[in-house]
Amino acid sequence: MKTLLIALSLVFSVQMWAQEPVVSKTDTIQEKGMSADEILKQAEAQKAEQARLKEEEIKMKEAEKAQKELERQAKEAEKAQKEEEKRQKEAERAQKELAKQQKEAERAIKKAEQEKKKLESAQKDVQKLEDRITDTKRDIDKLQAKLEKGKLKGKLSPNDITKEEEKILDKKEKVRDLQLDLEKAQRKLKKVSN
């Protein structure tokens, strides 16, 4: 930009310097009392002045050409700078997109791990309930065997028989409750696994 201002000031100063008054041939001839030598000298001076003016004009054109070249170079530099800024913005945009994709991948991994934990937990719950049902049924079988054995030996009073039968009924009710819980846990496992 500074070079542009310098070039412009150079052009204007050359133009101001070139605007000197020029004496035309008709003015010199019309003057009375001039000799042929004076007219020739004056014509030569005019030719020299014209040559000087042509030189200045050529210099002005060269200065304008240099100025246009500077302007063209400035435009190219500005265009290159804009291209560089554009590439930089593209790189930043790509980097942001990559970071976004990375975060999404991390979220997906975290979600998959959570789903896996839920699935494992649901499987453990089902297994635990199945084990409890099996244990409770085994306890029922033992209680019934004990009750039958006591009845056969005649060692149990009617009150003891009633207590043992209540224990068996409680265990059977517990098995039903556990089976309901097992069904819920199996539904949850099915939901989680899908």
Image (cartoon, helix red, strand yellow):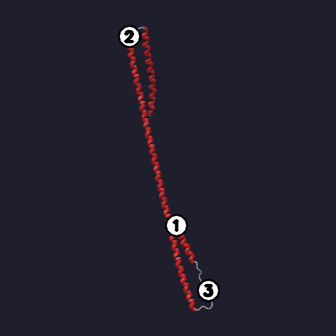
Residue that appears at 39% across and 21% down: 135
Marked residue nearer the N-terminal end (3 or 2): 3
Mark 3 or 1, which is nearer the eye?
1
Q: Residues within 10 Å of mark 3 (few under 14, many from 20)?
A: few
Q: Residues within 10 Å of mark 1 (few under 14, many from 20)?
A: few
Tell me the amino acid under the disc marked 2.
Gly
Residue receiving disc 2: 150
Tell me the amino acid under the disc marked 3.
Asp
Asked if residue 176 is positioned above or below residue 118 in the image, the reply reads above
User: Are discs 3 and 2 less than 8 Å apart at CB?
Assistant: no
Marked residue nearer the N-terminal end (3 or 1): 1
Q: Residues within 10 Å of mark 2 (few under 14, many from 20)?
A: some
Q: CA distance from mark 3 to mark 2?
A: 159 Å
Residue receiving disc 3: 27
Asked if residue 180 is positioned above or below residue 149 in the image, the reply reads below
Residue that appears at 45% across and 25% down: 181
Marked residue nearer the N-terminal end (2 or 1): 1
User: Are discs 3 and 1 less than 8 Å apart at CB?
Assistant: no
Picture coordinates of residue 173, whole percent (x, y):
45, 19
Q: Which type of secondary structure does the marked residue at label 3 adopt?
A: helix
Mark 2 or 1, which is nearer the eye?
1
How many discs appear?
A: 3
Tell me the amino acid under the disc marked 1.
Lys
Picture coordinates of residue 88, whole percent (x, y):
47, 55
Residue receiving disc 1: 2
Residue 194 falls in image quadrant: top left
Q: CA distance from mark 3 to mark 1?
A: 45 Å
Residue that appears at 47% across and 52% down: 92
70 on left or right of 137: right
Q: Which type of secondary structure does the marked residue at label 2 adopt?
A: helix
Q: CA distance from mark 2 to mark 1?
A: 117 Å
